[in-house]
Image (cartoon, rainbow, N blue to C red):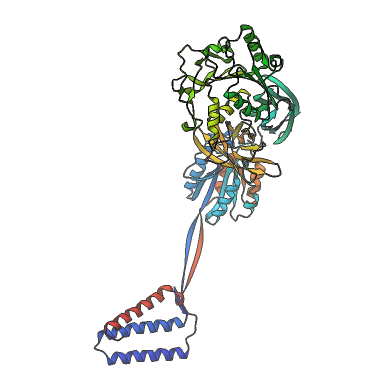
Amino acid sequence: MQFSFLHEVDITLWVLLAISTGLVFFLHKIIADEKWYQVLLIIRSVVLLTFIILLLNPIVNLSGESEKKLNWAIFVDNSASIKYHQTPSIHAIQSGIQTFVNHLSEKNISYDLYQFSDTIQKVKRPNIDGNGVTTNLGMVSEKIKQIESELAGVVIFSDGLITEGKNPIKDFQQLDVPVNTVGIGTGIELVDVAIQSVDVPTVVLKGDGVNVNVTVQSMGKVSDRLSVSLYTNRELLGSKHIRLSGLGSKKEINFRFRPKDIGKQNYEVRISSVEDEINIQNNRQQFNILVLKDRYKVALLTGSPNKNTAVLKRVLKQNPRIQIDHFIRKNETLFRPAIKTFWETPYELIIFDNYPIKPLSSNFVRILGKKVLSNQAAVFLISGPNQSNASLKGITSIFGITVQDTTVEKKSVFWDYSGEKLVHESESPPLIHNIYIKGRSNSSDTLAITEDDWPLWLRHQQRNIRSMVWTSPGLNTLYYYEQKLSQAGAFSTIWKTSISWLLKTGGEHENYFRLNKNRFQQGEMVHIAGNQPFEKQVSENNNVIISVYDNDNEILTRDILFNIEEQRWMGGFRAPSPGEYNYSIHFDPNLDPIQTGTFQVLESQIELNQVYLNKKFLTMISNESKGQFNHWDVRDSLLVNMHPKVRREFKANIIKLNQSKFLIFIMILLLCIEWIIRRRRGLY
């Protein structure tokens, strides 16, 4: 420690110091017996002396030397590709790393051990299992840069494959510590062919051509001629032969076909495998398309006009894609218009409104059954005020129901939905119940039930034929009750559910989005896009949210943004660990989802596509940072150049006393004490 003055001591200071000393001595002689006054004199002398010293700008120089031990940073790759190398095995890597750090301890070399993949984790001992999702060497370079001043050097054990993040070469160039690399694996790249994505519309109209764009990626040395095929169920829709180039190259294949059936249709793209391929699960991908008709022909058969008739015609005409033919029964054999038109016209849906009132003839029922089968038409029976169980004699098989013998009591009954409540109970007024039925088989579902446990709303499906029965003549009651509400009520819920199911249009307003495929590898990017217009539900400036669930646990949430250039909503996330996952898409987390779906993550990881030693990249890292590259087999040769290292540090701290807050505080404290003493002695 050294004490010095920045200001030179001149004659003025000496004169001031002499006068001050003489004055203090004189005052001490005058009042020698007053101890309290001597205390005041001492305090004032100390303050005055301190002030004079501070005028000389005194400084205190504290300096010293210390040694700081430097650590070696050992980074070990724990990504998925590590465990798929044929040599060395994952167990050999585990034991090899343990032996390496044991040698460091024997040489008294301090080290910090890290394992990295898509994250970096500091560990006490190696625990290599290859469960990392991706390899991000960019994070390793950033970590080294953060602790560079504390390092003697760096050793990285890796195969050098980057599957996530930036290229870190420039970061390694800027480091001042040597980075040694140890290469794991061999330079022979494994072979894999995978369907990377399937781009296809989510909703199409029947008869329109559908374009399917398939992207195939090949890894390793692949030059085979392969076939790519498109199937629906077991039917082959098309096949094309392609020749792949391997080495990560991609090839696009286009198919075009016209859907034959309406509803949600399932398809699958398959590509043939190659010799020694490491993963054949990604050689096929499934997708579905919702096929709709541009126009639906609906027949409305009315036995006797009633309060339901006007309501049915009104809501049917509100749908611009429905063309309605209304047939009204005049007598036993006469309809207006002529029933001949009904027999000659194919229909997608036949609605029975208060019809039949009396049992139909066996011949009429037989012809009607043939028409339903030939047209593959859906049938919807809506009970009317003139109907009873006897009215349905002979026609129940078409609807998949059986009538039950019971005493008919025409009274209003309360009712409720069988499953999830679709609307609040206050929006479900009591209804008259006049037809008592049961489902014919397990193919029947009761959607609503009365308080007496009789089906009120029942649906049935036998192969491709769908039927539905509403057993109350009070459907119009629900309609007019809903008109008094400020939002959709029971009628809209029942009607929209029925029509969308019967016409197989369910989901046409929900199938906005599609994942690029339904089967992914762990760590692979999952891309989602939406092409369907939102019909004023959301603007281009709003975000759509996708949430992914493992069972009922939400594991991630991402935004789907509108891409102006592509004119579509686009988003993405990395596939989590292997398993089956559900996802939901919504405008607001507090609202019901507009679309739900599932996807699968395979046991194989994305890094399976790249399992080889990237020696060139690891060598470049070492050369740029003045380190050296060694293969796994000769990793111990690094120990020759690894020694304990320390850094000598010289520290010098200069303290300016006239800037010391502590010294100023002491002076103020002394002056306060003097003031208190003077006040008590009556000097103020």
Pick the quarter of the image with the C terminus.
Answer: bottom left
**Quick one: 645 or 376, which is closer to the camera?**
376
- Give above or below for 331 relative to 585: above
**Quick one: 110 or 323, which is closer to the camera?**
323
- Give above or below for 383 relative to 98: above
Q: Where is residue 564 in the image (x, y as percent from the top left)?
A: 69, 45
Pick the quarter of the image with the N terminus.
Answer: bottom left
Residue 679 located left or right of residue 450: left
**Quick one: 361 or 367, which is closer to the camera?**
361
- Numbered disc total: 0
Q: Position of residue 262 (x, y in %)?
A: 67, 23
Q: Where is residue 174 in the image (x, y as percent from the top left)?
A: 63, 55
- Give above or below for 257 relative to 671: above
- Give above or below for 8 relative to 644: below
- The residue under the point 65% across, 49% down is 169
Q: Where is residue 42 in the image (x, y as percent from the top left)?
A: 32, 83
Residue 94 located left or right of residue 346: left
